[in-house]
Image (tube, rainbow, N blue to C red):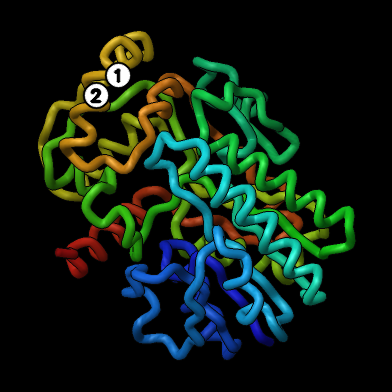
Amino acid sequence: MNVLVTGSSGFIGGAICRELVSRGERVRAFHRPGSNTLLLDDLPVEHHIGDLNDPSSLLNPMKGVSVVIHCAAQMGNTTDWKHFFNVTVRGTQAVLDIAREEKVKRFIHTSSVAALGVPEPGIKGSDASLLSETHTWNYSPKLWQYGYAKYLAEMEVQRAVALGLDAVIVNPTSVFGGGDVLRNESSVIRLVADRGLNLCAQGGMNVVHIHDVVVGHLSALEHGLRGERYIIGGENISHAAFFHTILSLTGKSRRLIILPPPLVKLVRRLFFITSRLLHLDINPGILNLAGYYFYYDLEKSQRQLRLSTPLDAKQAVIDASQWFKEHTLP
């Protein structure tokens, strides 16, 4: 089958392209001019250069494809809401509209668990507090523009579904593993292991290996139900435990300082200045989420998409660290 992958030069898009090629599929890789194509350079893909802000650039690559996997979006390292909206929301709308016009048979939309909103603050992830696919946006758009843009993009997908498009939404958690080109220098793994970062906020997250993200996408392509969303996740882990995992695997012995949420918010301006000096790829608004435990229930995706037990956070850190060692970018 012919598959169009948008955002193909990125971490997730590039890994999906590689797996599709290994399965013998014909891949069209859509990416912006000037994108780092390290993840695609050795693959026999058909490159299509364009931009989500220019819908006309999508017309040719969409011709004759049966599947679209839409990974392109604005990442969370800007405070410019207009840019978030134009790329993630309007860009998604354009891809969906053209996919319907071209009668694409299956559309996989890469969203994020950020689109689900936030859990109750301070709850440490008991079974009753795990976020699932039924959770919806419940946070201030101004305080988390990335998440809100992802939520609005999902609304565009649902609109297209109502108009007849066979689309499925996947919601990856925090993705780690080999191939993170964008955050080669700014990944928390490198900051902790190589640059001596020893501060983290209370709270937690779900860490998923890039391998499981790829498997989740392609399983959604095969088994996902039209109009449904699926959380693609791995291990629920506290920030402190994740930092300790990085330190233990890199042989570092360093005292970790865990900051309570009020202190994070008190010093967030200073932290923002420091993060820019360290090239941390984060939106300063994310500091408002200190203290939340972003833990997720994977039951639906594992059952309906027929997924096996995901790799743990330790393996994700191991593989990411090895890839960073082998691909130090200028």
Name the amino acid, label 1.
Answer: Arg
In percent of width and height, residue 241 lies at: 33, 33
Q: Please, what secondary structure does the residue beneath circle 1 have?
A: helix
Q: CA distance from mark 2 to mark 1?
A: 5 Å
Assess disc 2: are there few (<14), some (14-19) or many (≥20) residues with their C-alpha within 10 Å of its C-alpha.
Answer: some
Write the residue at 75% across / 63% down. 97
Camera-nearest residue between 285 and 62: 62
Looking at the image, do the residues carrying marks 2 and 1 touch, with CB atoms under 8 Å apart? yes
Q: Is residue 301 visible?
A: yes
Name the amino acid, label 2.
Answer: Phe
Q: Is residue 247 visible?
A: no
Q: Please, what secondary structure does the residue beneath circle 2 have?
A: helix
In percent of width and height, residue 127 lies at: 63, 28
When the figure is inspected, residue 31 is found, relative to residue 168, above or below; the finding is below
Q: Quadrant of residue 298?
A: top right
Camera-nearest residue between 291 and 166: 166
Assess disc 1: are there few (<14), some (14-19) or many (≥20) residues with their C-alpha within 10 Å of its C-alpha.
Answer: some
When the figure is inspected, residue 123 is found, relative to residue 106, above or below; the finding is above
In percent of width and height, residue 314 lies at: 34, 50
Q: What's the mark number on residue 299? A: none
Quadrant placement of the C terminus: bottom left
Please name the residue that numbered disc 1 is placed on.
268
When the figure is inspected, residue 208 is found, relative to residue 166, above or below; the finding is above
Write the residue at 57% across / 66% down. 215
Write the residue at 49% across / 24% down. 143
Left or right: 222 in relation to 40: right
Q: Quadrant of residue 290?
A: top left
Please name the residue that numbered disc 2 is placed on.
271
Camera-nearest residue between 304 and 151: 151
Camera-nearest residue between 85 and 109: 85
Write the residue at 52% across / 73% down. 30
